Every structure is written in C-alpha cells, then in structure tokens.
Image: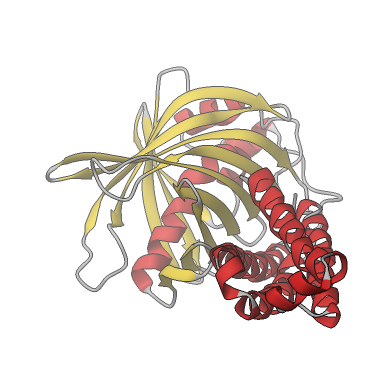
Amino acid sequence: MKLGFGLLLILHGTMHLIGFVKAFYFNAENKQALGISKSAGLLWLLVFILFIALASLFFYDKKWFYLAFVTVCISQILILTVWNDAKFGTLINAIIILVSISAYGNHHFNNKVTKEKTALYKNITINNTKVVGKNDLLPLPEIVQKWMENSGVLDKQNTVSLRLKQIGQMRTKPHSKWMPFSAEQYFNLSNPAFVWVTKVRFLPIINMVGRDKLTNGKGEMLIKLASLIPVVNERDNHKINSGTMQRFLSEMCWFPSAALNHYITWEFIDSSSAKATLTIKKHSVSGIFKFNTKGDLLAFETNRYYGGSKDAKQEKWVVKIIDYKNFDGYRIPYKCKVVWQLQDGDFNWLNLEITDLEYNITEPY
C-alpha cells in the first residue's frame, strides 16, 4: 500500500510535466490553442518538482503531509485552467488530500502517545532494585508461590517496568469479522500504570488507531477511525476506571513479580485458585487466578462492566491462557484469548500473541 501511494505521487507529478512541455516545446499555433503560457509552464514544472520532493519525504517517513497540502492546492489551480484536458487529476488530488489528512491525524496521535509513554516512565529507578528470594513468596497462597517459581522470578530483580509488542485479532460484536491488529504496551509497576497503543486494520485501506491508558487509578480509552474520527473517547468514568484496573490485574501474568507489590493482596480460595485484589488510591478491583496442579496459570476471571455507558452491566470477563514462552528468563503466557461470558453465549472478542517483551526498560520502542 505504501509503495502504491508513493508511485501515485510520482506518476501524478510526472503528468504535470506535460504542461511544461506544451508551454515551451510546442509550436506557437498549438501553444495558442492550448492556452498555456511560458509562465504557466514554469508553474507546471514547479508542481512536478514538488510532487517528486513529496514522494521522497513520504518514502522516508518525514512530515510529508504539510507539503502535500501546498502542492495539491497549486496543482488543482493549474488543473482548473485546462479543465477539459486535466480534470481527471482532480480525483488523484482528492485521494492525496484524504491520505494527507489521515497522515496528519496519525502524526498528532503519535505525538500525544509519545508524551504519555515518556511520562509513564518518569522517576522510575532501575538500579538497586530488590532481588526476589524464596522467603518473599511465603506470605502468598501456595499455588501462587508455585506459579511465581515456575515463572522464574526467584533470584531475579523485581520488575519495575517493561515494554512489549503484540499481534492478534479483535472484533467488536459476536459473529462480526475479525480485524488484525498490532500493538505496543508500556508498564510502570512502581506506581501501577500502563499505556497500550494499537493499530487495527478496519478496511483494506483504512486503519483504526487506539490507546488505552491507566494512571493513578483512572482509565482512558481512545479509538479513532483513520486516525481522525473519534469512535470511542472515554475518560472520567468509574466503569472505565475499574475495567482498566481489572485489565492491569489480568496482565500481571506477564510480570509475575508484581504479585509481591504492596498494591496487590491475595486470598486463598482452594488448591488451584486464588483471589487477587488491586488497590490504587482507595479504589479496589479483584479477580480470580486459576492454575493447574503444577502451578501454571490457566485463566483469569472477573466481573467487568461490558462497556462504559450508563446502562452497562457487569459480565464475566475471562482471559484464557493458550501457550507459554520464555522471554528474558521468564516463562510467561504469550498466547491468550479474551472472552465475555454473556447470557447469549461466549463472545471471544480478542486473540493475542506477544512477539517481544523486555523487563526493566524505561525507553519506548
């Protein structure tokens, strides 16, 4: 897709050379019939040069969209002067403008997210982080101790931050089509917070971008179609706050040493399950971790609001572990599926796979 659009810029720019050639190299009779003066011909040449420069900026991922707005404006003015011969170029200019607007929206979105990533990692100290020992696990339910040992936390530094990459599929309704996505996620475990950024293939030529965020116990959800049109923009909503905290709690399977942190408390349920409670600024959420007899995590369950609207009700939300993999010395679930257990049946809305994970890193990808 990127190559195709770049070639379109070059081809469209090259077509503007025709105006230059007609102004300078046709005979006087033809030039008079076409109505292109030498001064106008120089403008056609200028637009050709601008489009080539524009294509170069585009291929090198520079801020090409600013130049696109100027170039298309000049191009369209020239097209209007020779409408009968060049009117098809209007359609190409319209395509370029639409893509440019989307690129500008994506640039603005990325700038916002970059600032949030930087703020997330501010004041995190990696040096002199405590090493987890056997005695640190003793206050936990026995099955949780087994899980942490199996995960590889013993004799390693406590995790205070991490970053990871994901790929997968998601859908918005039962029986709707699956949409592929890629994502990055950043965690602060000293003061529980995260930023999750995703790009979702909505249509063959249209993407959605999204960002979920947890800071100081408050959640935010932002989804934009083509990086421009807000589809979801939720904040200052207690249902979103609790749901985002529950998400953090479930994702502790990727950073198991956080089970020892002061903001997590544990309650024994039976030999294969335990209840964890996350508390941030006097607000608490809970969920149940389920294990096999060896101490491998099988699933996380909680009652979570199904949406953030006023009439949203709590439904059972389940993260099911599919497979494990080693990352940076830790054995963690790297394939999961997320299911809403609704009255009408199970709604598997998300399947994900972790492709990269690094601990105690304080720089974004």
Q: Nearer the viewer, residue 103 or 333?
A: 103
Q: Residue furthest left?
A: 344
Q: Nearer the viewer, residue 253 or 343?
A: 343
Q: Is residue 25 visible?
A: yes
Q: Residue furthest front?
A: 29
In percent of width and height, residue 255 lies at 61, 41
Q: Is residue 215 visible?
A: no
Q: In the rendered image of this protein, does residue 155 appear above or below residue 263?
A: above
The reply, left or right, for residue 33 in relation to residue 144 is right
Instruction: Give the residue at x 82% y 74%.
Output: 28
Q: Which of the 4 image quarters holds residue 113?
A: bottom right
Q: Nearer the viewer, residue 191 or 352?
A: 352
The reply, left or right, for residue 97 in relation to residue 13 is left
In percent of width and height, residue 195 lies at 60, 59
Q: In the rendered image of this protein, does residue 252 appear above or below residue 124?
A: above
Q: Residue furthest top?
A: 294
Instruction: Give the residue at x 43% y 29%.
Output: 321
In percent of width and height, residue 336 lies at 45, 33
